[in-house]
Image (tube, coloured by chain):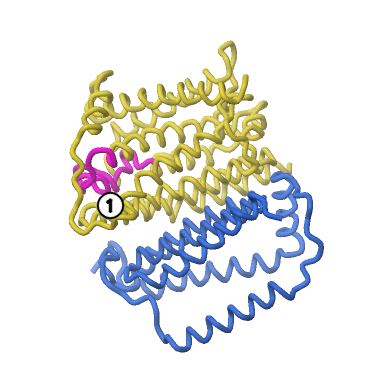
Chain colours: A yellow, B blue
């Protein structure tokens, strides 16, 4: 397939995937499956009046939503959906995922701080502490998958799982990456930065209209992006019988996304200090252990 | 010879300098930290323009995390609620101006008069660059990197230990 057709199909499937994720998100909050709901909220936010807070920081206020959705779109472009369909095949693909996630955190801090309101600001700093903490296990788990593939090309990482998927080869890394993905997408039970019940919406408390729409859309895309990342790194990517390659990637990704929201629906929200404590005291040492274990198995 | 590469190099270089200057021209810690981040990202972009893909991506990633950690540490140590307070980013002005001028002259002199060897005409592929860098870090430069890493870690643990006055959930 030509690269243009490739990117067109990936985008189309991705937009469809994001819509399904939006329906799932609604279900995880209300318990109802409502297929029209996301479209209605989209239109509502699209025409909503833009309210700006007093003495907001203009530069950050305008850049934050664009930076947020921009880095997520960049991440999508490097993920391989099948052997031939990756928009940019980057030699540092595995590292790039983490580099992009870091700017999700920066944009949340910018958005929280810029509006000059207390809830948003607290949410922004919470997001920063949470995402710094949980990007550590992500980068260490990524390192272990790169070690097995002996390459940072994401395609090579998928192909290294031909004999055995990474989820079985390095289960500790999978669990850490999965939990960290939940924390980085700040989904429940890790939704402290934007929790409605805790901070009246946190980072997004004072955002309306297009800016909020960009953040909401960006988060849905982020959930799907990280689901694809889980599939590519641990669940054998496009591998599977009968169906075409990219169909497998999307099926697996949607299942991973559904599992995220199922956990969110049935788990209570975790206290902020506990959340940080669990990661720094147990997550990071476990991630180091995972690198060690993979190294030993590789050398045996 | 003027190529697109050279033009981009100049643009990102100027952006790095401009954001670096902005760091000291604001009265807010958060703006200053994020200006520094923008300056560092511009340097990362310089690496990317020079086709050092790994170094570029690494620079952009590390600086994002580092500047965020720096911002949160500044907030904690300066007792500034939320980074909304005013602060002056400069101190000991005469000494720092003198030091700045001296270092600029030194660095410019080194850049102009140093022997840079022959200019590389071909760049190895990103994959090959990563392999070579790994060999360098794990062979010749291992001692330097390990020492620096352990020193930084010790510094971080020590600073947190010093700053800790009450323990969370401590029984009274």
- Foreground pick, A132 / A291: A132
Q: Residue A212's x, y, as percent? A: 27, 40
Q: In which quadrant of the rendered image does the C terminus of chain A lie?
A: top right
Q: Is A197 a magenta residue?
A: yes
- Foreground pick, A171 / A213: A213
What is the span of residues highlighted in magenta in the rendered image? A185-212
Relative to A243, A269 lies left or right: left
Marked residue chain, label 1: A
Relative to A46, A127 lies left or right: right
Numbered disc 1: secondary structure: helix
Relative to B64, A294 lies left or right: right
- Foreground pick, A201 / A3: A3
Q: Residue A33's x, y, as percent? A: 26, 19
Q: Residue at x 43, y 24 (%)?
A: A254
Q: Residue A213's x, y, as percent? A: 29, 36
Q: In this view, does B41 lie above or below A47?
A: below
Q: In this view, does A207 lie above or below B13?
A: above
Relative to A179, A188 lies left or right: left
Q: Residue B86's x, y, as percent? A: 27, 72
Q: Is residue B8 above or below residue A38?
A: below
Q: Residue at x 51, y 23 (%)?
A: A8
């Amino acid at each position: 397939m030509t690269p243009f057709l490739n990117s067109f199909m990936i985008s189309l499937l991705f937009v469809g995937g994001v819509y399904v994720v939006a329906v799932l998100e609604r279900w995880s909050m209300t318990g109802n499956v409502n297929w029209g709901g996301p479209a209605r909220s989209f239109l509502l936010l699209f025409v909503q009046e833009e309210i700006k807070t007093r003495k907001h920081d203009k530069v950050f206020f305008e850049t934050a939503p664009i930076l947020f959705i921009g880095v997520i779109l960049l991440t999508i472009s490097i993920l391989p959906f099948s052997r031939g369909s990756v928009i940019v095949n980057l030699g540092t693909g595995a590292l790039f995922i983490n580099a992009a996630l870091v700017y999700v955190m920066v944009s949340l801090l910018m958005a929280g701080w810029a509006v000059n309101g207390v809830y948003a600001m607290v949410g922004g700093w919470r997001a920063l502490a949470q995402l710094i903490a949980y990007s550590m296990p992500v980068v260490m788990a990524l390192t272990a998958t790169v070690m097995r593939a002996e390459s940072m090309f994401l395609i090579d990482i998928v192909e290294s799982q031909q004999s055995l998927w990474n989820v079985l080869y390095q289960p500790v890394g999978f669990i850490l990456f999965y939990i960290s993905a939940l924390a980085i997408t700040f989904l429940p039970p890790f939704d402290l930065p934007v929790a409605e019940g805790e901070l009246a919406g946190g980072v997004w408390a004072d955002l309306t209209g297009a800016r909020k729409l960009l953040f909401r859309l960006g988060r849905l895309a982020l959930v799907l992006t990280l689901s694809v990342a889980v599939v590519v790194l641990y669940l054998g990517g496009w591998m599977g019988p009968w169906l075409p390659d990219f169909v497998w990637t999307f099926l697996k990704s949607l299942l991973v996304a559904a599992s995220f929201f199922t956990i969110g629906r049935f788990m209570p929200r975790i206290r902020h200090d506990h959340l940080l404590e669990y990661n720094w005291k147990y997550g990071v040492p476990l991630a180091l252990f995972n690198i060690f274990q993979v190294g030993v198995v590789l050398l045996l | 010879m003027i190529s697109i590469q050279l033009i981009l190099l100049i643009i990102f270089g100027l952006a790095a300098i401009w954001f670096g200057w902005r760091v000291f021209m604001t009265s807010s810690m958060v703006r200053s930290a994020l200006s520094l981040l923008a300056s560092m990202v511009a340097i990362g972009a310089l690496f990317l323009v020079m086709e050092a893909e790994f170094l570029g991506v690494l620079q952009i990633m590390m600086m994002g995390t580092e500047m965020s950690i720096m911002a949160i540490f500044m907030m904690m140590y300066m007792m500034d609620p939320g980074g909304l307070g005013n602060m002056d980013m400069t101190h000991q002005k005469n000494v720092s101006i003198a030091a700045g001028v001296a270092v600029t002259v030194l660095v410019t002199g080194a850049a102009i008069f140093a022997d840079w060897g022959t200019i590389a005409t071909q760049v190895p592929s990103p994959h090959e660059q990563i392999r070579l860098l790994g060999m360098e870090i794990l062979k010749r430069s291992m001692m330097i990197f390990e020492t620096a890493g352990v020193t930084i870690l010790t510094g971080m643990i020590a600073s947190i230990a010093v700053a800790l006055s009450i323990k969370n959930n401590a029984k009274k």
